[in-house]
Image (tube, helix red, strand yellow):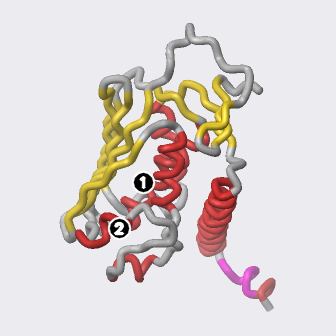
Amino acid sequence: ETAVAWDKWDEAAKRDLMKDMEIYTKQLKQIVDVMIDFSLFSSETINLRQSPVDVKSAIAQVVSDVTDGFKGSLPIDLHVAVADDLRVQADPARFNQVIQALLDNAVKFTPAGGHVQIKATKLGDTASIEMRDDGVGIPAEALPRIFEQFYQADNSKTRTFGGMGMGLALVERLTEAHGGRVEVESKEGEGSKFTVIWPLARATTEAPKAAAAAEGGFHVFDGGTL
């Protein structure tokens, strides 16, 4: 019966369904990946293969990936401002994962037609990456717990979109594993601003470490070498 129904659909309807399937499959994969990452953190077996990462290129890739999760374009107005030649010391995949989790969160909790801004600048020997939105915001009583695993602020937007409350917890753990930190400012009904402070890329004259160094349970490889 399904095959017969498929044959009766026009090409536009088929493409629409295939796009839905692609989106839901990616969402499921993200959930599974996050659960695996927390398991690695718990067992202290997560590896960070650090190298210089160009922030502008990384953010551009994240924006493209997040946009692919929607039909057409993003439902919000996104503005990106990144300083030229800004590079951080990071595991490239993990850095992208942090930025994507923050952008996913901002888009998720900002009404259609709202605004999200990503701003990245140099701050001393670190990079400051801000993710600001004019969405629903976070209740004051929820702010101290916002990075706890499985915690979600109890508001209508959270209940509408669901989720496991693991994305921001992973953002904090990955950022701190790289020697950085993440901060949040928010007011319910007015939006939120998440700021990631991340170490800049080290000078290329510094020799990469040839062996893994266990730092706080994380195996860190500089330069991607063993």
The quarter of the picture where the C terminus appears is: top right
Disc with the residue nearer the chain's start (1 vs 2): 1
Q: Quadrant of residue 121?
A: top left
Does 131 sit left or right of 47 as displayed? left
Residue 105 higher or lower than 86, as above or below: below
Does 92 sit left or right of 192 as displayed? right
Q: Residue furthest top?
A: 205
Residue 136 higher or lower than 83, as above or below: below
Magenta-highlighted stretch: main secondary structure? Answer: helix
* Magenta highlight range: 5-9
Identify residue type, mark 1: Leu
Q: Find residue 118 and report its horizontal and vertical position in percent.
A: 33, 44
Is-magenta flag for residue 169? no
Which residue in the protein does label 2 denote?
109
Which residue corresponds to the image point at 69% horizontal and 54% vertical from the top-left? 40
Q: Is residue 11 visible?
A: no
Question: Label 2 near label 1: C-beta < 8 Å?
Answer: no
Residue 74 higher or lower than 209, as above or below: below
Q: Is residue 205 visible?
A: yes
The front one of 223 and 116 is: 223
Q: Find residue 17 and report its horizontal and vertical position in percent.
A: 63, 73
Which residue in the protein does label 1 denote?
103
Identify residue type, mark 2: Phe
